Amino acid sequence: MSAHSTRPTPVATAVGRPGPGTGPTGPATTATTGHGTTGHGTATAAGPAAYRRLGQVLPALRVRCAPPRSGRGWLAGADLVARPAALRELISHDARQGLARYGRPLRPDVAAGIGLHRFVWPVALLFTLPWFLERRVPLLAPGDIALRRRTGELTVRPGAFLCLPDDPAAPGTTTAPPPGVRTVPDEAALAAGLRSALADFLTPVLDAFRPEVRRGPRTLWAMATDAVVEGLWYAGGLLGEEERARTELAALFAPGVFGASGPTGPRAARPAPECAPFTPGAGFTAPASGGSERSDRCRASCCLVYTARAEAMCAGCPRVTRG
């Protein structure tokens, strides 16, 4: 298997790893909520219940609600976007792992790309899991999180969040709504709020990685889209809700189309990226069957891991599925 295989695996085979080669390695935590499964979390925060539930099925990733940490292997998100030396240390972790795995050094830009994926993959779950399980969207900044890649730990400082009008924390449904809670009118607005919250968080992260990855904004956002989609798809599979995860991710990143009043001519039917800056479309294909190595998803970006080992082409690599 390659560095970024994307097909979820059963819980029994996932202990000790957050996805086939994609997420951080190390121990883990978890929640009880779900839109259509277990309801909202506590009335005061977005995420703690969802993170606890994740830890129950994914011990390799531990999420704690706490202030960001530093030292002893911890990397604060604020340092990642502000200190190039901190970013390079994170990338060197993946460079060392790549050397051990492939027996030859990774190209610096390839190590940086893998480092970006392995940062965004778990951190995006801090946003997408509360949305998926609680219908709440945390409004987080890089300064609200810290991670320790060696042990697979994340800390997050919960704060303001978006919710729907029927949420028990929504203003008007409780006499003392938590500070920073904002209500949006419907599911479409909540999904738009999730995309916006993720984009606000990731913009400075991608800006910091760009000189190391050596790729343009469009490719960086394709890489971010892959990490966001693959993280929730994998977690949904572990939670027994893979099909709902596929359906909701496809809707979340669905490309828009020009309406009747839009442009005419040859470009009129071209999808309009309403989910910008993310790549339109979640990339799902018909499920593979019969033990096929084919992925159920075509990635939007290429991780270039084949430059380290020619046969290490990812399942779902666009160089194969779109070749």
Image: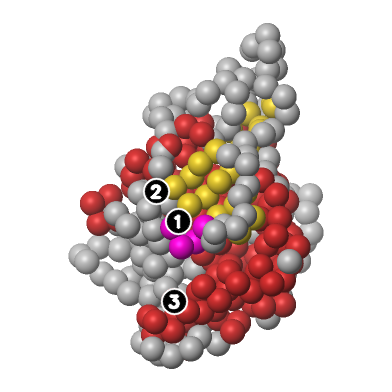
Contact, mark 3 vs mark 1 (Cβ under 8 Å) = no
Kindly tell me whether residue 253 is visible in this rendering.
no
Drawn side of residue 232 relative to residue 165, left or right? left
Estimate how packed mark 2 is, as few (under 14), some (14 to 19) or many (20 or more) residues with alpha carbons within 10 Å. Answer: many
* Residue identified by numbered label 3: 97
Q: Position of residue 250 (x, y in %)?
A: 51, 51
For the point 44% across and 47% down, the residue is 62
Q: CA distance from mark 2 to mark 1?
A: 7 Å
Give, as a three-letter code, the residue at label 3. Answer: Gln
Give the SS element for disc 3.
Answer: helix
Figure quadrant of residue 80: bottom right
Q: CA distance from mark 3 to mark 1?
A: 14 Å
* Residue identified by numbered label 1: 152
Q: Does the magenta portion include 151?
A: yes
| Bounds of the magenta segment | 148-152
Q: Which mark is residue 28?
A: 2
Give, as a three-letter code, the residue at label 1. Answer: Gly
Q: Position of residue 17 (x, y in %)?
A: 35, 59
For the point 68% across and 9% down, the residue is 175
| Nearest the eye: 120 or 98 | 98
| Nearest the eye: 241 or 118 | 118
| Nearest the eye: 207 or 196 | 207
Q: Position of residue 225 (x, y in %)?
A: 58, 60
Kindly tell me whether residue 146 is visible in this rendering.
yes
Q: Is residue 114 above or below residue 54?
A: below
Give the SS element for disc 1.
Answer: loop
Give, as a three-letter code, the residue at label 2. Answer: Ala
